[in-house]
Every structure is written in structure tokens, then in C-alpha cells.
Image: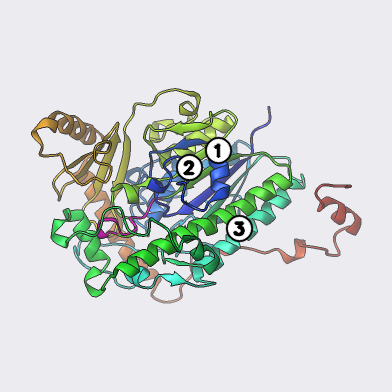
Amino acid sequence: MSKPNILILMVDQLNGTLFPDGPADWLHAPNLKKLAARSTRFANAYTASPLCAPARASFMSGQLPSQTGVYDNAAEFASSIPTYAHHLRRAGYYTALSGKMHFVGPDQLHGFEDRLTTDIYPADFGWTPDYRKPGERIDWWYHNMGSVTGAGVAETTNQLEYDDDVAHHAKVKLYDLSRGTDERPWCLTVSFTHPHDPYVARKKYWDLYEDCAHLDPPVPAMDYDDHDPHSQRIFDANDWRNFDISTQDIRRSRQAYFANISYLDDKIGEILQVLEDTRQEAIILFVSDHGDMLGERGLWFKMSFFEGSARVPMMIAAPEMQVGLQRTAVSTIDVCPTLCDLAGVSMDEVIPWTTGQSLKPMGQGVERTEPVAMEYAAEASYAPLVSLRYGKWKFNRCALDPDQLFDLEADPHELTNLADHPDHQGTLTSLRAKAEARWDLDRFDAQVRESQAKRWVVYEALRNGDYYPWDYQPLQKASERYMRNHMDLNILEESKRFPRGE
């Protein structure tokens, strides 16, 4: 039996609350709505960690950051950790990546046979936080509120240039795969940087949301003193005191963000059209690495376990999975085992060290009862934070902070912490026990500190003297493109044509 092709469409920092059952009705996203109509849709999918590099390493490996060691945006993803690209390639798949995956370290492939673009972010240790210096802002790379005050319209940006290139290379690769010169099944991952800030969009998409009813956050900004300790740390890390954020700034940022969802929808539509035009069939996964708070509570970007930051859209269109909405909480660490399950590829040799679960049974009506776990140990934290989503409950814990317990059915905006409420002490005790069984927070903290300290030494050493970058350099083999004199022109023209002879 032939193995299915797999197309993964990944986006960056897309708030999952905007995808209650596919894209919200008011979003201008016809291609994603069309994909949703034939997909298993996961209304409560969560990131493994609300930050790019940790989330992506977990997404690829099926392991939490405490297992991968990718704690932050400058932590090395070890080449010894198997990813879905390794598992599929080992089983005979051709694997390729077009776009972002924020790999840190000298291995910039992690199982991909081909990488069609470079990354948009650096691959070295320069963005390493330092728990030894709590409260210190590393100004040259920490987020600040300039993304909000600078929101608006532009026809090209660093990010737009990147995503245009990502889509172009993905389409070229799909055309190439259609020619049938490689008989292997394929897995193509196409990973965009939008709608990640800065909040800047092309005018054609900006205009779609000129009169949008959702430009104000559902929960307005709160006073600094009314926030929980971790949210206060996020404010401090984002340098909020040096910016005056107006209502217009907030509305323009959200308008640009929504506009960039429509931009992505166009790019995804172009890719899916090539798939259709070349008569190729594939399982399709749509997912984001984490979300964006989008001004809710006054918070922006990610780094938080609140729904806007931690919840992501996820949809899978596969013949073996039923079309429809799944409300049970799932995780992005479930992607790796799910893809392997759908492809008929065994992960038995690494299952003891993989915490993700296949979602294929859920797409066939099987109930899931395990809690979903999240971790965060990067900028704006001074010690690791952990979270469990279990049924309607979310339980957050950090050694530095009071516990948090939220009833997401009664309180979807997480405004009322029930951890001290006498009626919910049984739930709190149960979830605290589950967390303590899963995590040794003192050990987790020690691992993060060791990793940070070592990386600071290595980074400073490698920046002293001649510097050799780890950034991926895409190789364009000009001697193998178009027509060259070691090729037969007749064979070339026929082999590059799809469909042939029509």
C-alpha cells in the first residue's frame, strides 16, 4: 500500500481563539475556510511552549521543552532528537522545508532532506536569556512595544519579502514533485512568519478590515498592579514604560494582524491551487506555533499561558479522520505521532521518550482523557512556568508565583483565579498533584540555568575572532537548472512538463 503525501502549512503567532471552528466568520480567509470544511478541526489545541523556537522543536519532536532542552529562542535543538522529518524520511519519504523553523545550532536540517530557504531568525546563541540577572532587559533583541506604535501599511517589509519567498519556493517544489521523477512519497513543510509582528500589512489586505467590529480587544488593558506577577514580568520585558500606547495604536495593530491572516490565506490558496492543478493528493495539516495576546489585558505577543498566547489553530484533512469539530484539548506535541500514525510509520523505538499522542483515534471518534501540558522558561521568566489544561480547567504553576486555576467554560477570558476559592480546593489539589507528578520544578530550573550559563560562554567565545555563522545557506545548483550541456534537451523538455504529452 502506498504511503500518503503530507503537506504541512505552518504559520507563526496565530491566535487560536480566532479559530473556534475554522477561521471566525468575520475573517476574510476563504481558502482556510474551504480547508476547514474538509478537516478535523481542533478547537482547543495548545502550544507546547508560547515562544517560537521551543514551540517548534516540540512540534517537530513530540516532546516538551524540558525534554528537548530547547527552553528559549537561543537554545540548541540537538541533532540526536528524532523529528517527524527523521521518522518519515527513515520510512522512505522525501522531506523538505520551505520557510521558518527557528532551529538553533549547527544542524539546520533536523531530518529534512532539502531546505528551500534560509530562516528569518538567527541560528546562534545570541538571544539567550539569563536567570542570573532577573529583571535585566536585553534591549537589542527583547520585544518592545514599537511593533504596536509602528503598526500600519507597507507594500513590502522584511517579513513580507520572506513569506513571498517561502510561498514561491513551495509552489516550485510542488510543481517539481508532480513530474514524477522521484517515486517516493513526500512530506513538504511550508512555514510562514506571518501574522507575527511587526503589525504591518499590504493595503489590499488592510482595507478588508477598515470597518471591522473586532479592532478593540475583548478584555481592555488593565493597570500594571492588577496583573499577576508573570504578566508584570512580560510588561517589564516589553519595555512598556517607555511607550505611550493609544487606542488608535491598538486598533491599527489588530487591523494589520487580521490583514496578515488574509495575506496568508492568499498564499496558502496559491499553494493548494498548485496541488490541485498538478493532481497530487496529500494529507494537509494547518497549525501555528503559538498565539498572540493582541492587546487583551494590555498584553501583546506571547510568553503567557493565557488563551490568546497559548491556544493555536489546528486542522487536519486526512481520509482516515472524520470531518468535524473536536473540543477536547490537544497539543502541538501530538503532531509528530499523528503524522507517523497517518503515514503508517512506527515510532515504537522512541515512544518511551515521547509525550505526544496520535490524534488519529480522536478523528475516528475515540475519546481522549490525558491532560495537555505546557512549559515556559524563556524571556520574561525568572524560573520555569508549567501549565495543565484538563477538561474545563487550566492550572498554572511557577515556584515564584501563586498558583492559578481557571474554569474556561465559565470564565473564557481567565479573569477569575479560583486557586484560593474554598469550593475548588479539591480540583486544585488534584491538578497540583498531577503537576508535581510530571515536573520537578527545582530540577527544571537548574537545567535551564546550566544551559543558559554554558551558552553565554560559548556565544561570547565564538564572537571573538573569525565568526562562522550557523545560518542555513540555501544552495542553488545552477549547473542542474534549466538547460545545460550535460543534458539531453529532448529528455529535459519532456521530463519537466506536467502533464506530459497534453
Which disc number belongs to residue 22?
A: 2
Image-based side of 500 in relation to 275, left or right: right
Residue 95 appears in the picture as rendered: yes
User: Which residue, as the protein is rendered here, is positioned at the far bottom?
Assistant: 465
Query: In this rendering, is residue 71 above or below 128?
Result: above
Q: Is residue 380 magenta?
A: no
User: Which residue, as the protein is rendered here, is positioned at the far left?
Assistant: 422
Q: Secondary structure at mark 1?
A: loop
Image-based side of 231 in relation to 334, left or right: left
Which disc number belongs to residue 37?
A: 1
**Residue on which the image places disc 3:** 167
Where's residue 243, x and y in %?
Answer: 26, 73
Q: Gap between marks 1 and 2, in whole Å?
A: 8 Å
Q: Which residue is at a point 33% across and 50% down the rendered structure image?
A: 308
Q: Which residues are magenta?
A: 290-299
Q: Secondary structure at mark 2?
A: loop
